Image: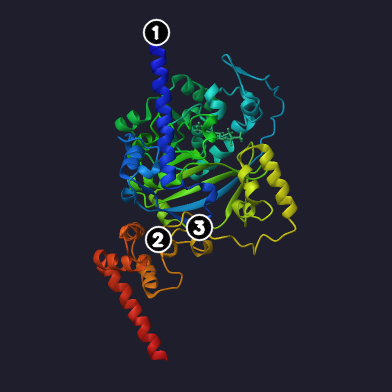
Amino acid sequence: MEPEHCRNELNALVCDFVERLCLKASCAALQPPLLAEKLPLGLSVAAPKRTAASLRWLLRGERPANAPCDPSEQEEAGLAVVDLCALLVSETVLVHYTPRPKGITPPPIQQSGEEAIDEKYWKRRYNYFARFDEGIRMDPGAWFEVTPESVARHIADRFQYDTVVDGTCGVGGNAIQFAMTSRSVVAVDTDAQRLADARHNARIYGVADRIRFVHDDFVKFADNYTGAPVDAVFLSPPWGGPGHLDCPHFSLRDVQVPDIMQLFAAAAKLCPRVALYLPRHTDLHEVAILAAQHGFPAVEVEKVFFQHPTPHLKLVVVYFSSDVAQQGIPKSITQKSVGRDRAQRLMQSKASVPELLSASAAGVLLRAVYCRSYLGRFVVSLALRLEEGESVTGRTCKAPHRGQGQPRQRLRSGGKGSCSNPVEIQRATAQNLCEAFGTTAVESDALVSARELLAEVPLTNALTLAKNAVQASGEDFGKSILRLGREKYPEAYRMVLDKRKAELMARTALT
Ligand code: MGP
């Protein structure tokens, strides 16, 4: 290639990279990303705000016509709440128990092609595949992309269906575990060598006959699919390699190929139950937008922690399904000890990990180093041990700063995690919304009625109502919602009013 041509190509690549970074930064400046580490266990509501241009960028990859770098140049007026989405935040702590299998001489440190394996990954080989020494095949990308066996097994335990599709099979970490809990698995990948490795690995686990390996692009595969009805789709797209953690947050637009938005759309078309495996610092506002775009009023965000050396957030799995709006609000952390055989120890613990980390001695500094390095984790561990004498309860948390008329970034979980059925979820969501958007601290009549009204209408309608109310400028949230309620849901509104009237009459009659 001509040097001039090379230079131009390099220039174009660098310009493209810088432009993408600027786009991402300007979106974050308009609305700070919503990170899993800031979300408490329980129920939260995401209120993603975007300008029309940044929304087109996220959803369709269309670049804005003007330079996006200076957020002040973006028209403030165009910034609107895209949609609201209920986030059911669950927490799972996994304890690996993968002793070296007896009677098998472990192979020496492996070379994969010309590239040496990073020692960090090599040390974790039994975490990736407990039966590694029986001849598991990996490739350079798989060392950092494969789902650790404990995580894959945990997700598979939640996915017990007839037909599961793994749209990004890789060397088979997830597909193998799905084959242990579901009747049949279709494993799709664009890389023929990886599929061959996955088939080989599945034979080691004795499940190759339950997996159909398909060499195809998942989007095309989903378009042409004619097989048995699919019960669930799992997607673990590339995150941009180990360097993805260098950025303060991950955007679904960080990876160019494959397009995660397209992958998801294809999956949602195949089956309305999709799980997305994402980095721990994913901007969940984007996830909420994705959910809204595909008609999911609520998603479950599962924060997956590893126990050792101290509990640390490793990744998030987002479950998109209509079931989520019906399930109970997570109350406690699931602790799971995952061993070489399928026997597991299940434990329930009380305090959430972030709650422990908000402990005074842990402080801002420790939270900053948290999850960044082993050193950071040991420091946190030390601080936690120092604090063991202190009671975890009774610590006060500062309320997050809220600008006037602005929704809070972080919302409290509803009903102290006491919700267990759809009606309670409904009420807790309404409570959450009122707390987030109410402009007066004092319980006004309008807010009380708004809460009742929101609790009466279905979750999707409640979220739509609240979104419209937020967008209706210059009015108190409670009043706007009442007005909108009266217009859009006259039946529900009348019911609420009648109930209130009846209560009032009963109270008057008693006094
Ligand atoms: P990791 O590299 O083991 O640990 O990634 P971490 O927390 O990133 O850094 P460290 O400081 O602990 O070393 C954790 C898990 O994330 C991996 O085992 C993979 O399952 C998943 N993962 C990591 N990357 C870079 C990718 C990726 O690009 N794509 C997908 N699908 N998963 C990834």
Quarter of the figure with the N terminus: top left
Q: Find out whether the residues at labels 2 and 1 contact each other: C-beta distance under 8 Å.
A: no
Q: Label 3 amino acid?
A: His
Q: Residue at x 51, y 34 (%)?
A: 174
Q: Nearer the viewer, residue 456 or 488?
A: 488
Dot placed on the residue nearer the N-terminal end, 1 or 3: 1
Dot placed on the residue nearer the N-terminal end, 2 or 1: 1
**For residue 10, which quarter of the picture?**
top left
Question: Residue 423 at what x, y percent from top left?
Answer: 41, 64
Q: Residues within 10 Å of mark 2 (few under 14, many from 20)?
A: some
Residue identified by numbered label 3: 401
Q: Label 1 amino acid?
A: Glu
426 horizontally vs 180: left or right: left
The label shown at residue 150 is: none
Q: CA distance from mark 2 to mark 1?
A: 58 Å
Q: Is residue 329 above or below residue 306?
A: below
Q: Residue at x 52, y 52 (%)?
A: 39
The label shown at residue 2 is: 1
Q: CA distance from mark 2 to mark 3?
A: 12 Å
Question: Residue 117 at what x, y percent from top left?
Answer: 61, 22
Q: Residue at x 55, y 50 (%)?
A: 91
Question: Residue 53 at what x, y percent from top left?
Answer: 31, 41
Q: Label 2 amino acid?
A: Gly
User: Is residue 1 visible in this depiction of the protein?
Assistant: no
62 horizontally vs 192: left or right: left
Q: Residue at x 47, y 19 (%)?
A: 193
Q: Secondary structure at mark 2?
A: loop
Q: Nearer the viewer, residue 414 or 222?
A: 414
Q: Quadrant of ligand 1?
A: top right
Residue identified by numbered label 2: 405
Q: Nearer the viewer, residue 245 or 213?
A: 245
Here the colouring is rainbow
